[in-house]
Image (cartoon, coloured by chain):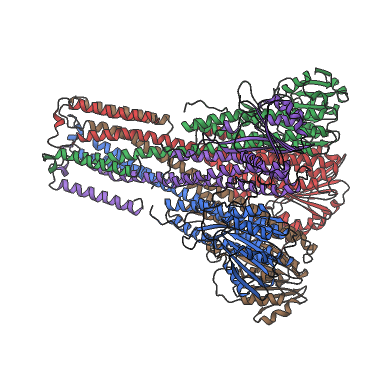
Chain colours: A blue, B purple, C green, D red, E brown
Amino acid sequence: MTTKSLLRRFRISKLMPRMATHTGSPGTVNYVGRKREAPVKMQVMEYHDDDFSEKEIKNISELLPLKNSPMVTWLNVTGVHDTSLIESIGEAFGIHSLVQEDIANTTQRPKLEEYDGYLFVVVKMTYLDHDSGEIVIEQISLIIGQNYILSFQEREEDVLNGLRQRIRTGKGRIRKLGSDYLLYAILDSIIDFYFTVLEHLGDRIEDLEETLLKKADQTLLNDIYRLKQGLIFLRKSIWPMREVISSLQHAEHKLITKQVGVFLRDAYDHTIQVIETVETFRDMASGMQDLYLSTISNKMNEVMKVLTIFAAIFIPLTFLAGVYGMNFHNIPELSWTWGYPAWWGLVVVLGGGMLIYFKRKKWM
Amino acid sequence: MTTKSLLRRFRISKLMPRMATHTGSPGTVNYVGRKREAPVKMQVMEYHDDDFSEKEIKNISELLPLKNSPMVTWLNVTGVHDTSLIESIGEAFGIHSLVQEDIANTTQRPKLEEYDGYLFVVVKMTYLDHDSGEIVIEQISLIIGQNYILSFQEREEDVLNGLRQRIRTGKGRIRKLGSDYLLYAILDSIIDFYFTVLEHLGDRIEDLEETLLKKADQTLLNDIYRLKQGLIFLRKSIWPMREVISSLQHAEHKLITKQVGVFLRDAYDHTIQVIETVETFRDMASGMQDLYLSTISNKMNEVMKVLTIFAAIFIPLTFLAGVYGMNFHNIPELSWTWGYPAWWGLVVVLGGGMLIYFKRKKWM
Amino acid sequence: MTTKSLLRRFRISKLMPRMATHTGSPGTVNYVGRKREAPVKMQVMEYHDDDFSEKEIKNISELLPLKNSPMVTWLNVTGVHDTSLIESIGEAFGIHSLVQEDIANTTQRPKLEEYDGYLFVVVKMTYLDHDSGEIVIEQISLIIGQNYILSFQEREEDVLNGLRQRIRTGKGRIRKLGSDYLLYAILDSIIDFYFTVLEHLGDRIEDLEETLLKKADQTLLNDIYRLKQGLIFLRKSIWPMREVISSLQHAEHKLITKQVGVFLRDAYDHTIQVIETVETFRDMASGMQDLYLSTISNKMNEVMKVLTIFAAIFIPLTFLAGVYGMNFHNIPELSWTWGYPAWWGLVVVLGGGMLIYFKRKKWM
Amino acid sequence: MTTKSLLRRFRISKLMPRMATHTGSPGTVNYVGRKREAPVKMQVMEYHDDDFSEKEIKNISELLPLKNSPMVTWLNVTGVHDTSLIESIGEAFGIHSLVQEDIANTTQRPKLEEYDGYLFVVVKMTYLDHDSGEIVIEQISLIIGQNYILSFQEREEDVLNGLRQRIRTGKGRIRKLGSDYLLYAILDSIIDFYFTVLEHLGDRIEDLEETLLKKADQTLLNDIYRLKQGLIFLRKSIWPMREVISSLQHAEHKLITKQVGVFLRDAYDHTIQVIETVETFRDMASGMQDLYLSTISNKMNEVMKVLTIFAAIFIPLTFLAGVYGMNFHNIPELSWTWGYPAWWGLVVVLGGGMLIYFKRKKWM
Amino acid sequence: MTTKSLLRRFRISKLMPRMATHTGSPGTVNYVGRKREAPVKMQVMEYHDDDFSEKEIKNISELLPLKNSPMVTWLNVTGVHDTSLIESIGEAFGIHSLVQEDIANTTQRPKLEEYDGYLFVVVKMTYLDHDSGEIVIEQISLIIGQNYILSFQEREEDVLNGLRQRIRTGKGRIRKLGSDYLLYAILDSIIDFYFTVLEHLGDRIEDLEETLLKKADQTLLNDIYRLKQGLIFLRKSIWPMREVISSLQHAEHKLITKQVGVFLRDAYDHTIQVIETVETFRDMASGMQDLYLSTISNKMNEVMKVLTIFAAIFIPLTFLAGVYGMNFHNIPELSWTWGYPAWWGLVVVLGGGMLIYFKRKKWM
């Protein structure tokens, strides 16, 4: 009962925050998620072949020139609980009010929606929290325009830092291609982090398996339970992503160039691989749980056998001892010369007979 | 056994009222549902940009002018057990007799049917009952014509009150658009209440989970059972709604304008989200039940071990005591000087041996 | 063990009669079903707007004029074990020999087959047997021609009596429409009886649920088992009916007029509703079974605890009593003045200690 | 433990013979199956309306004239382990080398392949072995040419004997139609034998069910297990047959005439019926297994209760007896006049109290 | 507990190597798999009808002439951890950088991708390790060009040796056909090894089944668990292969000639057969696990009965013995002449009564 748990808990409250109090009119921008007070941050990266600039935006008025910038522009907003800000950005970039509503609602399902002049993509990122080691699932909303991408998320994380670094240093082909490639690069980074989380879970499953074959206790059971619940949430996050990427790939949208199509096919393959691995893990977790239960039954059976052997041998013998402990005046056996040794003989024969019987029944 | 139940019961009789005594001819209007005597109420809302009027209709003759009103007209009928009333309305608006039959039958499956000049939509609303806190599932039938919507339900509820208030105050875009947007707004309000119910269930699941990891008793078991049965009914109500909205969205029906199509896509997404959450909850409930059963098995195993240890140690020792409690005349050990201490020595060795054996078997 | 069973048994032998000894050539008409000797009955109804006649046919020669009657003709044959009769009718109406074979085989799967000039429909009726209260599933084969319907069934039942009465009295639109509407009316009556059976099962499920929460015994278990087996058969009967009606609805067959299409859509909806209810009942039955098993485990756990507490407290104390019942000559404690009270003190301390220990373990 | 098993075992080794040592080049004809030494038999039937001849072929040279015979020719080869013979036949009829390879491999999956000038069909036959009563699954490969059918199987069986007899006696329409009807007739005979096997299993299921409700022991458990394993194999054999017949029916192949299409539709229906019955049996077997397990749990619970009642009543009383069997010198109760009756009074009160307690707990 | 395990363990770490640290830019070639240091080997086979040459390549410059060789060229690279080598080869043959990345990542999912001028195929090979007897799953990446095939794998194995030998000796049609037939031949060899592995597992399942019916212990349980986990991985490897071959077969790609299409259809059939066998094995393994669990329950029930019978008979009798072992001064029965025999009479009656009771309950 004191074994250390191998897995931290997936908290529903974290993975499935307050879902809805959409009591307002449709298209009204309400923040739906855990209450937060962190300040909002707006970061802009602009790049084009050799050009590159990066700055933090403090004032909404700085947003307006971004839309028509000749460079590829990536505006990342951290903190979607500031709904008035989302409305301002929406106005500046001409975003439909339903989209604004969806951005502020951090409990959206991954999806792709086409609007005139831009695409709206919602996906879920996953990563391991630095401090707690817990698996976190976070929503990121993307608006892909001709030459820009707006990304909205609630909390700062590491998932896209590698990508940012590649843009800064100009490594790879990122600087040479447009906003559609940037979209691919963001999705690819997100999927890569799914692999990281899955690898972590894979290690945990191996640990659990090893523990299971040695010793089955309640902690292990709770761990398997947590693992399964966690996989339910990962699955819920990644399944719809498949459709998103598939639609991006097949939709003949002018924003997605043919050149990027090849990369999206690759991202699609990786998504399928994540999905299959999640399903495999679910199967394995179920297998472990079955094994656990069977092991428990097995052990109980053995405990029962030990109990039964002891009881079945000694209870009759104790009865026999009781018989000659009685105080009846005329128990003839008591005064026999060989009474006591004969009694022991009887005990040995009876006890031995029971032992042979249990051996034959393969209980020992 | 006395722990308070966290979940109220879903009553089949409430969720699946008397299903059918369709013994009449098809197209005959018979009320199918729980017997009710509440008076019927007909409320009309008419609106158009700045215009707005609301009244209660007492007389059937008032219905006739509504159909051709230049404003958007929403007639809500509470109480479908008055079948003659439904026939009158059906006649006034030219509704097919099969539709009339379906309106009076509150056990319909959500569906969309196209007729000449109007659409017929049946969906299920869900909400938490004020008094009992129980989840209620209620049918609403909608007839959508060029410029009007007729809605029929059996009981008064809160689901659409927010929408009514928005129409009254003229907030949002509701007043600017036609009956197709009103249809969307009704469906959207209904889906929002699904989220509310799911959030309630999500809280219950978290409570159950917490309780489960601390203490597993029969009440908990019944709660999980109720939760699962309830989810079966929610699932049955929401699944067909997906088809309904999907058909509305894709059908090239002249009553549904393109402008509203975008909103229906959003409603469709929310429906999918409700469905996935229901499925996730089902998975989680199954996971909890599995954990519960394993926990019980585990505990039983431990109880068995305690019993076996006690029995296996003391039953043989009691036998040993019985031996020297016998009254045979010539038991030589009884008169040995060190007989009694030697006996205790034997007891300690045997008992200690058993203890070591059980320690080795990791039973202690 | 003596609780009255809430559900009568579904007998496989009744629901799945002798399946096949098709050893003959294909197209040979062999009766396949339970042996029966009941006399064959042929009833004819002819109607047209105001005209209506009804008679029983005794002689095969009377069949010939029926085919070309200007009125809508419904010939119902009760007793398909008379294969020579089926062959005669088949000849009179020009029915393919494979169809004749299928009519005589009462173990067909529901299906729709189009032939030149007529449609062949096989469906399963279900109803509650008057006497035994058992659920009966019976086959009905229908041949739909331009102006006539031939129906074949093995046993007389009530399912279509309501419809016959409506034809006799001329209520509803039945007399005004052709043989395609009659087909719809027959199917609709059959589906309505599914609802009746389901309602009966729904009541049983509620009863079972109530019993389950109070008291779980073997009778209940057998009832759940029977319920599940029965639902398997209902499911097998209704699923293919969905395809049958869907094909009728969509096939552009000249025998099915557009006017009747609307009604078939309604029948299709009802079929889906039956299917969903059957699936829901299956889910509920599984849920009850799970709850039952968990409850048993739970109870076993409690029984075990009681046993363990008694055994663990009294077995050591009995040992202690045995110690001082021994007849060793020099047991010093026996002659101590306070020996006996001290012994009781020890017993109280040990027993009380055990009680406290079990309280702490939450076993009491 | 001695109850006679109701079901014979399905042996994997029989149902899934050595699968593959395809180490040779593709298109090399190697016998894949259980080693056999039985002599090969080649039987030819030729027929046409009134003509009919039947002979056994001993020499490969006799094969050549068969291909262009004006009559419908059916060559049945029993014993596919003679691979050189298959090659000779393949050469004579111009069969692709991959087809030859597949014929010799008795572990094929049912399939239909179209080649220039002929169709290649592999299906599985099933029947009850005369001697052992076991269910046997055997492969039959068919090559259907313009005017001939070649059939290959490893062992002689009864499945097609009825068909052969019909050809001999000229009953039914078999002699009037071509090789496509012969193909249908072969498939139909095979499906009919599936029904025979299913009927046999259906009887077994009823027997098992009856036994189950009376008495649940290990033999029954093994029987249910065998039944399930057997159904897995039947399922594996029949599922792909559905595709085979469906393809035959829909493929616009010149070898399949329209006239035979109607018969193939009938065969397709029967295949579906076999599939559904197999699935139903699987569901029923699972249901029985669940009931069995629950019954065992239930019984264990009752056994436990009996044990607990006995132990809880008599262990404390035995302790009480032990107390006054102690040899302490000054146990005052021993010398009380009413000591012994008072002790009995205490025993009755305690024992009775326990009995009342257990009655209240509904354990008795 | 000491029974030898029949199945070796499938190690996740072996079957699912480090999945991803794709932190680099997409298209960057990083080795993803277990760390390895084995030297890289490049083997070239060139053949054409009668011509055949085979050599090992040591220098990258030797690669260039291969692409345009008039013969069919098969370059096999063993050791994909040398990423710079992969890049060189990629450059020489004009391979897309994403393909290069995928080759170096040994955790890909089987897939087919079409590029200009070549096809990229990833599949999983499986075989039994010579030394350990473990099942190994290994990735092989294939690039199929007009006249060449490049194959990449991490470890040397036997799977393709038979094929190599056939090329060397010029047996079969391999030398007469192009690179598309070589692709088929490689896939066919890989599938054949799946059959070998499945046959091995089939033998194990039979062994397990036989053991299961004789004796159910923990080792067996672990074996069934390993079997199931192993099947999960085999399934994950073979399922996507179906799509790969299906796409190859249907895609109208100029690299795949019609002649080879027939062979691909055959390979497709074999793949389906592998998949179905894997599924059947999974079903059988589940069946065995269920049987195992039921058997355990059954045994536990019997153990419990033995215990209960012993306890219920002897505990009351021991109490009776205790009664007359008491030292009350005035126990009248003790001095009765027939007291002792009467006591034995009571014991026999009570014990016999219990025995009859248990016989009636069918516990014995």
Place residue C54 in its image quadrant.
top right
E360 vs E65: above or below: above
* Residue B251 position in % (x across, y down): 76, 45
Residue positioned most to the front:
B50
* Residue C182 position in % (x across, y down): 79, 27
* Residue D115 position in % (x across, y down): 81, 55
Q: How many marks?
A: 0
* Residue D343 position in % (x across, y down): 21, 28
Q: Is residue D131 visible?
A: no
D89 vs C87: above or below: below
Of residues B1 and C216, the one drawn nearer to the viewer in this rendering: B1
Q: Is residue B181 visible?
A: yes
Place residue A86 in its image quadrant.
bottom right
E132 vs E59: above or below: above
Q: Residue at x 63, y 43 (%)?
A: B191
Image side of residue B271 versus residue C91, left or right: left
Image quarter where the C terminus of chain E lies is top left
B180 vs A326: above or below: below
Of residues A156 and D356, the one drawn nearer to the viewer in this rendering: A156
Place residue E87 in its image quadrant.
bottom right
Image side of residue E208 versus residue B359, left or right: right
